[in-house]
Image (cartoon, rainbow, N blue to C red):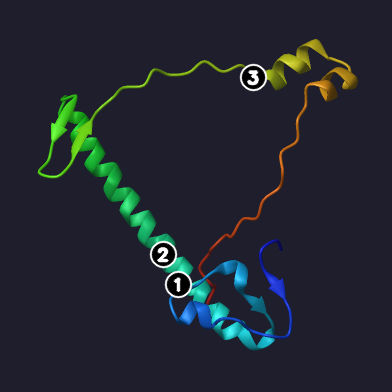
Amino acid sequence: MQGLRRGSCAVLSHYRAGGFRPWSITVDNSTSHVLGGIVDRLASVKAGIADLQAEKAQLESVLIESGRLAIDGTQHRVSVVEVMGRKTTDWKSVAEVLKPSQVLVDTYTTVSDGYTIVRVSARRTS
């Protein structure tokens, strides 16, 4: 896993002291309980973000339904802008119909760098 080092020494005092830097953590078996706490905190943060996103959607809906293009608050201003839909081409379907050679496909194919995902889910209780 890129960014995290596995080793025999735990450097988790940064997290407890408020200077948490994920790239500075060295993980071993004695840090599992601390990492468990980090997992639970991450789940809590993600749940809070979901709640805030739902509230944001409701507030935006009220502002959009007002029909106004600009609305001033006491400290902020909102502009409501309608963005036109975009036109996209389903190139996979086009390629299936035209049946291009693999050389032609490879010529116009790019590959992006991989990345790491942290997924959070509720633990199952028995």
| Left or right for 38, reference 1 | left
The C terminus, quarter of image: bottom right
Given contact means CB atoms under 8 Å apart, are the residues at marks 3 and 2 in contact?
no
Which dot, 3 or 2, sits closer to the camera? 2
| Residue indicated by mark 2 | 45
The residue sitting at 83% across, 21% down in the picture is 107
Residue visible at 61% across and 55% down in the picture: 117
Q: Earlier in the sequence, mark 3 or mark 2?
A: 2
- Give SS at disc 3: loop
> Does residue 56 lie above or below 124 as drawn?
above
Name the foreground residue: 11 vs 121.
11
Q: Name the residue type under label 2.
A: Val
Q: How many residues crowd around disc 1 within 10 Å: few (fewer than 14), some, or many (20 or more)?
A: few
Task: Quote the CA–CA distance across marks 3 and 1.
Answer: 41 Å
Can you see residue 19? yes
Badge 1 is on which residue? 41
Question: Does 51 sit above or below residue 17?
Answer: above
Q: Using the numbered discs, state the Cα–Cα distance from disc 1 to disc 2 in whole angstroms.
A: 6 Å
Find residue 112 and report its image quarter. Answer: top right
Q: Which residue is mark 3?
A: 90
Between the C-alphas of marks 3 and 2, the distance is 37 Å
